[in-house]
Image: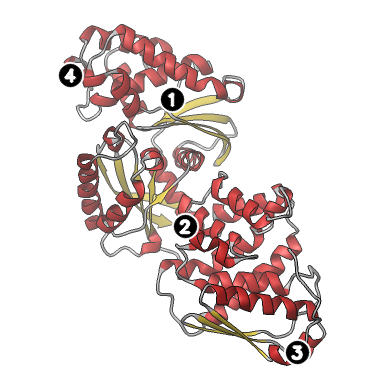
Amino acid sequence: MTAYSTLAAVDLGSNSFHLQVARVDGDQLYPLDSLRAPIRLGAGLTKDKRLDESSQERALECLRHFGERLRGFDPHSVRCVGTNTLRVAKNAAAFLKKAQAALGFPIEVVAGREEARLIYLGVSHSLPASKALRLVMDIGGGSTEFIIGRGHKPLKLESLYMGCVSYSLRYFPGGRITKSAMKEAEVAARRELQPIIATHARGNWDEAVASSGTARSLAELIELNGFGEGGITPDGLDRLRQAMVRAGDIERLALEGVRTDRLPVLPGGLAIMSAALRELGIERMGVAAGAMRQGILYDLLGRFTHHDMRDVTVQQFMQRYHVDPRQARRVAALAVGLYRQFSDGDAPASEAEEQAPQFLDWAAKLHEIGITVAYSGYNRHSAYILRNADMPGFSRAEQERLAGLVLAHRRSLRKILPELEAFEDWREVMALRLAALFHRSRSDTALPDIRAKAKSRSFRVKVDRDWLKKNPLTVAALREEIEEWAAVGIALEVKVLDEIEAPSDLALVG
């Protein structure tokens, strides 16, 4: 994969949007430019979980500015990630179409644990090298992530549905702050923390650090107003809480270091931070400079230096679901080879086409993971796992693409056609289905030379006549395959197949 001298990351958080541009020097990144806008996308969620028009317009205006800064960047050198609000908004898909047009680049919506992984990656690269176990906490606008890791490797990842925007709106409407509201918000956050106390409380880590603008704002207010020094402490938060309650309204908070753009979300962030320190036994929390946008950059860099987290995830899933690695490699090699023949001479018309061999390789290695659930209909079980599991490195759209390929690799195409509407390029599906068909014996027996061509909605495959005569099961399977494709309006021709007889009583099941 091509290496780039400059990379860019766009973080569409529920509170703020960030753009970070960095120069690549070996395995290191050096900041060149950054932009931030307090969009508060999470504040635009209505009661029925839909983004309102005003929040969408704020976001689109910001993305048009980001797009102007990114003009001229290669699409592969930019990665844009959406988080909690875009995970939960019912009209996120419609908004994302407009957002991608405004930005000029694809936008990925990542799962909570993938967000946590990217946060840890960014934070760990901003801290001194250490063998200590670190707890990293990041309060976002709609979710808060907790990660325990060592070095650059995250070991425990959690994402909780509480954030500074959502809590500020819910418990401190209009910026009004009361003692009872603060207590109610902290109790709610403490309840949310209960499932992770056993794995993330003191004793599971050596030091604790926080990232995000909320944490930095809290630390600065504590330091500048003499409430404490050297990070965030329970006592410092208590004194800051008292100052907020005395003010009664966030707009009347007369403290040194108050940033007006942070004021509306400060009470919710304080409540969450206080609850976390109390429930997890944190006596002092440092503040890191790194955040998710730096993690996105380092993850993007890894894809160009053969450290793609997605490859690691695929290998882990193969082990977890006891995939036969030899069979997976056989199917992957043939699927990729057939796709390249189908595409012979055609320059990739889109990023999806350019990535097709990589996705075919991953799909082939994961197409049998559902067998551990049940052999019957295992392609559906495999697709369900790929669609819903936490897969570090993969966006939701990428997981959907993998799930679609795996679902379509066998059995009736007509029955699953509604689930494959996103597939405009049937060459991927054809390549994977034929690869699985030819390797059905699960043996290392050499296959004949297979020649393949594709044109519009028709495919032509040429296989040695003598080999086919010796493999009647494959002949029967190919005839069934021709019928399957005909049922969805696509022609598959296998040369010389009509010249070969297959046992009339041969029926293939499975």
- State the residue position of label 3: 500
Residues under labels 2 and 1: Cα distance? 29 Å
Residues under labels 4 and 2: Cα distance? 47 Å
Callout 2 secondary element? loop
Q: In terms of sequence position, does the residue under pointer 4 or pointer 2 come before the other? A: 2
Looking at numbered disc 3 in the image, what kind of residue is underneath it? Ile
Residue 184 visible in the shown view: yes
Q: Which residue is at the front of the view, 69 or 184?
A: 184
Q: Tags 4 and 2 in contact by the CB under 8 Å rule?
A: no
The 10 Å Cα crowd at callout 3, few under 14, some 14 to 19, many 20 or more, is few
The residue depicted at 81 percent of the width and 81 percent of the height is: 503
- State the residue position of label 2: 26
Looking at numbered disc 4 in the image, what kind of residue is underneath it? Glu
Q: Is residue 122 left or right of residue 378?
A: left
Residue 188 location (% of width, % of height): 43, 17
Quarter location, residue 12: top left
Q: Is residue 443 left or right of residue 301?
A: right
Q: In terms of sequence position, does the residue under pointer 2 or pointer 1 come before the other? A: 2
Q: In terms of sequence position, does the residue under pointer 3 or pointer 4 come before the other? A: 4
Q: In terms of sequence position, does the residue under pointer 4 or pointer 1 come before the other? A: 4
